Amino acid sequence: MAQQTPVRPLGATGDGAMIDEDWEALRFRVHRSAYRDPEVFRTEIDRIWNHTWLYLGHETEIPKAGDFKTRTLGGRPLIFCRDAGGEVRAFFNACTHRGTVLCRHSEGNTKFFQCFYHAWAFSNSGELAALPGDDAYPDDPAFRASMALRQVPRLQIHEGFVFVAFDADVPDLLTHLGPAAHYMSLTAKIGEHGMTTLPGVQLYSVKGNWKLAVENAMDGYHFAPTHNTFVGYLRETGFAVTDDDQYAYDLGGGHGLLVLTGHNGRIGMVWEPRFGDEEKTRTVAKRRELEARLGPELAAEVADASRILFVFPNLLLFDLEALTIRQLEPVAADRTDVRAWQFVEVGEPESVRALRIKTMVSFVGPGGLATPDDIEAYEAVQRGITATADSADPAHDWSDMSRGMANEKQGNQGRSIDEGAMRSFWRRWAEKVGAGTSVAGDPPAGTPAAGPATGGAGK
Ligand code: FES
Ligand SMILES: [Fe+2]
């Protein structure tokens, strides 16, 4: 991207930078207007969401010809559908006649999308199929062709994960994903017969900036204090969580990865007592199946550790407990819509499916033992940072993310309980929005690892 004009001269670091990074003082801080300022929000939509690959949905959400879902990305209403020929498509959900929202259902199956306003009808591959009183329009096929539904300029699929871009000139999806593509593939390899999303979506709205949700997912530091009820519950069931040997990786491009070996169990992969004896037997058999299909090394990488993967800017894959796909949609500087789907093995027994769903809702579901804690954390930050806005002392209006910099400076792999994954995200964010990073001192030499050197062990 070309050099961007700074969002606004904040003056807090003397050069208008919103990120202040100092390798002598071992300080990394983010100016709080980044979460609060409507102008920053508009700039993010313009410079990130309008020019980057965005996660739209999984192709298993629309398995049959004619299936569709509607959703909004970067504030733009979209139709995500499978056309009559089986091709996955994304259209702007706006009638080409006068711009009415064309499809007002959240999901369904249809051959045609018909606008309620003047009844123009479009096929599920976008052609204008019918318009009442067409004798009043030019008798010219070019006219109808010009009124076809507007497709989103780019759509590419990686392992069933469908991404779109509103800018035709973005680099290919795999270039954008970089090493993150591999971790998405690991998740896709879990099921012997493939993976699928379950019908239904968890949709909730958070009174907080979207970047707080990213930080929270990349933040192992908060786990024990924020989720102490859940940690206590695990302890009561005979399972001890640990923060030892758990690492965070900068995957480049703003993408981040936590690899968690001591977090807690995962259905079919890492057994713990609350899953019950039947699941214990199945976990052993599942490991054999993975090793036979993928070889021991890849099987270990798939199975041994929980992972949280962030794909910049709007996708989170929680491969822990069960498997959750989470999508972030920024609505305003202080409002974010979150959608979450369960991602499951095709053909798994009903009892396993039931256990998976129970496990998922007990932790990362919006009524579980963890996600409400996290939402309270985002919202409490959003409320708290109003306190120091335009403070008499500008030095007070910054949030600190320096944990682990001394370790990082020595060239060691960052731990999941440090804040290195957040720092990587914020650097990329600042670069994309033109918010500026003020860097003092010498950053660590060498390129950080783009993931664990060997399968799942974390280091
Ligand atoms: S706006 Fe859709 S048919 Fe007129
Ligand atoms: Fe959390």
Image (spheres, rainbow, N blue to C red):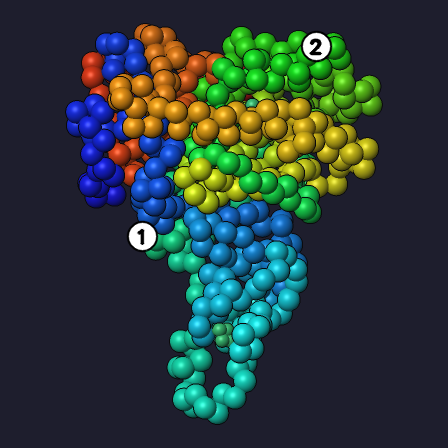
**Residue 19's quadrant in the figure?**
top left
Residue 339, position as x, y percentages in the image? 57, 42
**Residue 423's quadrant in the figure?**
top left
> Left or right: 134 with respect to 305?
left
Gap in Å between the C-alphas at discs 2 and 1?
51 Å
Q: In this view, does 4 lie above or below 18?
A: below
- SS category of the residue bearing label 2: helix
- SS category of the residue bearing label 1: loop
Residue at 40% x, 76% y: name it: 146
Mark 2 vs mark 1: give the one in front: 2
Residue 326, position as x, y percentages in the image? 56, 37
Q: Toward the viewer: 253 or 369?
A: 369
Q: Toward the viewer: 104 or 357?
A: 104
Q: Can residue 3 be seen in this view?
A: yes
**Mark 2 is on which residue type?**
Arg
Q: Mark 2 points at which residue?
A: 235
| Number of numbered tags placed on the structure image | 2
Q: Name the residue under label 1.
A: 169
Extreme front residue here? 392
**Mark 1 is on which residue type?**
Asp
Q: Earlier in the sequence, mark 2 or mark 1?
A: 1
Q: In this view, does 172 lie above or below 78?
A: above
